[in-house]
Image (tube, grey):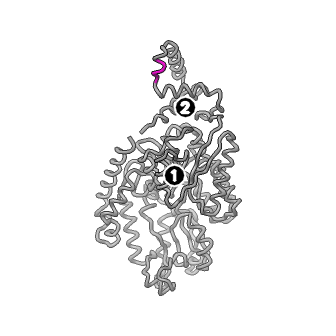
Amino acid sequence: MKTKKAIALALVLSMTAAAAGCGNSDSGNNSAQSQESKDQESTTQESAGSEEEQSADTASENQGEEAESTDGLPPMTTEEITLTYACWGLAEKGETEAKDKQIEAFEKAYPNIHVEFVTIDQGTWNDGLTSMAATGSLPDVFWVFSATNAVANEWALDVTDYYEADPDAKEVYPEMVENARLNGRLYCMPTVMFPYLVFLNKTYFEKYNEPLPSYDWTMDEFKEIAQRITHPEEFYFGTSNPNYIDYFPALYEGYSNRGWDGEEYHFDQVWVDALNLKYDWIDDDTLEWESAEDKLRYLGDEGAWPPAFGRSAMHFDWSWTIAAFEDAYTQQSGCEFLYYPQPAGPSGAEMAVVDYGVISANTEHPREAWELQKWTSWGKEGVLNRYEGYKEAGLTAISRMPVTSNSEAWAAVKSFTDREDFLALYDHLEKANIVSSTTSVAPGYDEMSAWMDENEIWAKLDNREIAPADIAAELTQKANELKDEWLANHAK
């Protein structure tokens, strides 16, 4: 699915590198030979030139009118243009200010480019994009809940060549990019991440005289503490929210959820062990998995969530839940919570939920759209201006973390706090090997989810009608079949 724009970009990149003296001698000779050949052609032959040659010629002729190229990327235009941009989350505190700061900074850096923000209802985001696509009015840059859906609908530009030419992009956590490639090509870039954390109840630990673990703890230590500190007879539990099948593949193998390694799915022994741990801990009450009747008995509400009442020693969750724990749940429970990195596994990798964005396949300004995407999401400038907006809004609990290892970006995150636990968490994340979740980017993921629902796989597993080990091979085969079908149909 290599588009004409991607082919033209490759030619422009080649010509830009040659002009800057960073191409090889063959490239220069080929350019000279090509020009000499063109001089000898008739008018008819010139008019019949390929679209790719015409695109490259136009770019070469306009270089004198454009800003100078940097770092191997094509130059930015100096013409007056407008780019459109859409992202979600604006109902959350600080997000409007963050978006405004990012756009303001981009327009200041590129005064000839006006950015028009496009509002799309978050609850019907995909429907909104579908309607815009039907009228040819998709934003130049926009976030997507499913990057594979955007590719399947031919909404997304192939940005592989931009990524490979931009040195700033090399600071993006590499597995976030590699997990998103489709047949080796890249159609999206990560925007923000929500890492998995352990919400550690310090008050609970003190209640049972359990020493706090080191921030550099391991999954084996987590398991030992969870079993040691659980007291179900008093309605207190070692841990909660057992999404082990999501993050165990990262901890133990460096894979994403469902064992996605960027090319194949693996419902393997790690997946089997993750489910078995969940079921074992449900059975022995290490894990909070309580009935409505027990919640009514102990908490006075059959719909109560025990972690919010301080009944879980170590709750696994995503960073977007920090604000609720810092505010409502601290007041409700009377407990003090600390925020720990994921316990380490043998692979040295860990999982995060990552949002992705794309550039419209129909944008008239792909180079400028790439720069806008950088300044509003994954780039250092995007991070710094995001956090300036947060400070303006008075935000203290941060949920959206950088997808870059850039030290200035993480220094901005750390400037929000002097708390030991947060600083330890941020130090850890800056240096971590982050693996992104597959939900948005893995081919066949949605189709596999639908197949599992149709065949009631999860219900059968949870009801112990089938054992994880008995179905793992079938799931692996089916997931990879659906992946192959998707790639054959949508990413040629």
Quarter residue 209 falls in:
bottom right
- Left/right of residue 336 with respect to residue 34 in the rendered view: right
| Residue tagged 1 | 356
Task: In the rendered structure, find residue 435 and report the number of the disc placed on it.
Answer: none
In this rendering, does residue 263 appear at all?
yes
Label 1 Cα neighbours within 10 Å, binned few <14 / some 14-19 / many ≥20: many
Locate the C terminus by quadrant.
top left
Please name the amino acid that badge 2 sits on.
Leu
Please name the amino acid that badge 1 sits on.
Tyr
Q: Is residue 352 above or below residue 311?
A: above
Question: Residue at 45% across / 57% down in the picture?
Answer: 250
Question: Residue at 60% across / 74% down in the picture?
Answer: 328
Read off the magenta span. Answer: 45-49
SS under mark 2: helix
Identify the mark nearer the N-term, 1 or 2. 2
- Left/right of residue 388 with respect to residue 153 in the rendered view: right
Task: In the rendered structure, find residue 13 and report the number of the disc placed on it.
Answer: 2
Residue 403 image position (x, y, % from top left) = 56, 52
Residue 309 image position (x, y, % from top left) = 55, 79
Q: Distance between the residues labelled 1 and 2?
A: 25 Å
Query: In front: 329, or 86?
Result: 86
Query: In front: 442, or 239?
Result: 442
Q: In this view, does 362 lie above or below 283?
A: above
